[in-house]
Structures are given as structure tokens and as C-alpha cells.
Amino acid sequence: MAISNTTNRILNFSAGPATLPEPVLQQAQVDLLNIGGSGIGICEHSHRGPVFDQVINDAVANCRTVGNVPDEFEILFLQGGATLQFAMIAMNFLLDGKSADYLDTGVWTTKSIAEARKIGNVHLAYDGSLTNYDHCPVDTELDLHEDAAYLHYCSNNTIYGTHFTAVPKTDSPVICDMSSDMFSRPIDWSSFDMVYAGAQKNLGPSGVVLVIIRKTMLEKCPDSLPLLLNYNAVAKKGSMLNTPPTFGIYLMGEVFKWILAEGGLQAIEKHNVHKAGMIYHALDSCDGFYTVFSQKQSRSLMNISFKTHTPELDALLIEEASSRGMSGLKGHRNLGGLRASVYNAFPVEGCAAFSEFLQTFAANH
Ligand SMILES: Cc1ncc(COP(=O)(O)O)c(C=O)c1O
């Protein structure tokens, strides 16, 4: 069952690639064929020509405006997904025999730790596996080293549906994987030295990664690194060392324009609190029929991981939801259960419909 009569689109709760803003997709349909009246589609333009020049310059400028990104930071577009960042961060900054503090809050940080260990010393400053990753730690739970090369953590754990409500306090540079909550709320840049995000949740299509990095960090990147793995080399060439992912950068730029049209990150955050709030309220108000995976204080606004009493009921919920035009609700294979991902572009009406459905399902079963 489609939720839109004009586009036949259904409600897509996928964790990523995920729902993108409809106005962006509509504009992309036009620009794929002929962008800006140039007679050539966005994917067909040379990355060295004036049309793409404008696209990437606008994307950087709009990213800066959306995120209120200070001049001390460079905005980069890279490839290789967030996963390549796990290795690149260590290659660029885990130097001189130092160790880096890592917070393990779930599958993605576990992977980032494994990659960093191939390059240098990792100090596990927080081990969330001991509590089955059911929350994000507060500062008193952390065992940070004073002279760490950096602290790496993930602000939103896509699989477990947990998020940090504050940036961990440390004197070391802070590097954050924001893949699943980038630009879902304003960012206090004084707390960060580098943030990165694979695009395919809140920013655009897969195949492009947004990196926002303090310029002083770039001075640390070793010249011995292959160029494409060296942040400083990428920055010097304006993310165009080689042919960049032109469509991904274009679409991200359109998403930035959309965020601005929606009223910016403060307005987006308000929407997100409201949207996730409706779903959590439904889950909490069914007399224990549902269990939310995350402890209350860490509940993510982007990914809502939960379950019913039995795997059979979980499967039935997915089946009934599917017949109502709701897809992508199966939980990650590591966790099981169910997961509703409601990123920036997921419609508020969809959250309302899902909340109602959750309550009806609980009443019927
Ligand atoms: C928080 C987080 N970090 C990293 C990744 C890996 O991203 P990619 O597939 O772009 O390498 C994901 C993917 O879902 C994620 O959710």
C-alpha cells in the first residue's frame, strides 16, 4: 500500500540507505537530465568544468551555513564509506607510538577499534559490551588517558538505538562518527576536532562521506601516506585529488538546501524530538507489550530499536506493517527484534501512522 497517491512511495524505515527528502529527489530527477539549463545531466558533467565547480562550491558553502561550521574547519568529501574513515583516522593521527582512546558503544565502534589496532595502540576507554551496549556512557564511566592521540566515539549507535546526549570531556582531540545523526541537531564545534558521516542516512546517497576537520589537525597528517588516504592532501585539492563522487556531492548539496528551507538544524532537531517522541510514547504506553532496547537516558532520535515478547510476534508485526505500506522494520542481525529509523527526511505523518499502528497491534495481540 502506498502512502503517496502521486509518487506511490511507501514509508521506508530503513537504517540506511534511507528516506531522502522528496523535494530533493524531485529536483534530482530534473537535474539528472539537464542541470541548470546546461543541456547536460549532473552525472555527465566534467568534475573540472564550471557547472560542477558551482555544485561543489555551493555544497561546501551550504554545509557551512547549515552546520554553522567555523572557518577553522575544512569541509571534505571522501569515498570508501564511514568504514574507510575507521582506518584513515588511525593512519593520519595515531602516530609516534601514542595510543588513542576509543569508546566501544556498539558494532560500528567495535569495527573502528579493530581497524585502528592494525595501525597503532588503542586504549579501550569504555567497554559497552559489558552492559550489552544498552546505553551511552557519561563521563564518570570513562577511563580516559591524559595524553591520548585523540578520543574516538560514535554519537549515535545505529544498531542499538542509543545516542550520547553530551560530548565526552577530554583534553585530547575529539573525533566523532556521526554517520547516523549528522545534522539531526546543532553541533557545538568547540567540542570537536573532526566529525565524519557516511551520507546514506541523513545526508544523501551512499558513496560519499562528509568529513569536517579542524585545520590544525591537517598539519599532523604524515606525507608518507598515499594521497587519497591523507586528509591534508585531500583538503589541499578541495576534495578533487581524483574524480570525486559527483552525484553524491550534488545530492548532499541539495539536502543541505532542503535543511535550510526547513528552518535549519534547530527546527530539524525540534521535528526529530517530536517524531521519535511519538513512537517512544506508543512503545511505552502498551503495558509492557514492547521493550525498547536502549536505556531511557540514551534513547536515539534516529533509530528506535525494540522488540515484542517473541520473535514470532516481531515477524507478524513486520508482516502487518508491510501490508500498511511500512517497510524496513527488521532489526539488525546482531540484535534481532525491530528497528524504526526515522532520520531527518522521514515524514512526521509516517511517525504518527506508525505510532497508531503500534498501539493497535499491541491491543490486537
Ligand atoms: C554509525 C555508523 N558508522 C559507520 C557505518 C559504516 O558506514 P559505511 O557503510 O558507509 O562504511 C555505519 C553504517 O551503517 C554506521 O551506522
Image (cartoon, grey):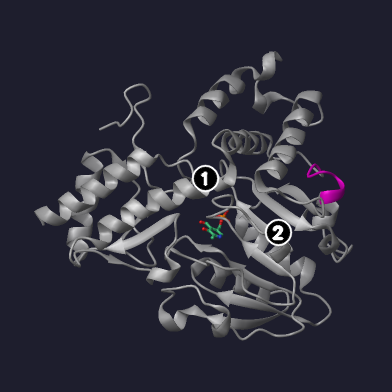
Quarter assignment of residue 51:
top right
- Residue 181 located within the stretch drawn in magenta: no
Q: Is residue 185 visible?
A: yes
> Does dot 2 land on a helix, a strand or a loop?
helix
Q: Which residue is under mark 1?
A: 268
Q: Which residue is under mark 2?
A: 189
> Does dot 1 land on a helix, a strand or a loop?
helix
The quarter of the rendered structure image containing the C terminus is bottom left
Is the residue marked 2 within 8 Å of ligand 1, measured from its CB?
no
Report the amino acid beneath label 2: Trp
Q: Which range of residues does the magenta coloring cover?
A: 235-240
Residue 14, given in percent of the width and then of the height, sits at 40, 48
Residue 37, given in percent of the width and then of the height, sits at 68, 13
Quarter assignment of residue 145:
bottom right
Residue 117, given in percent of the width and then of the height, sits at 66, 77
Decide: is 135 above or below 182.
below
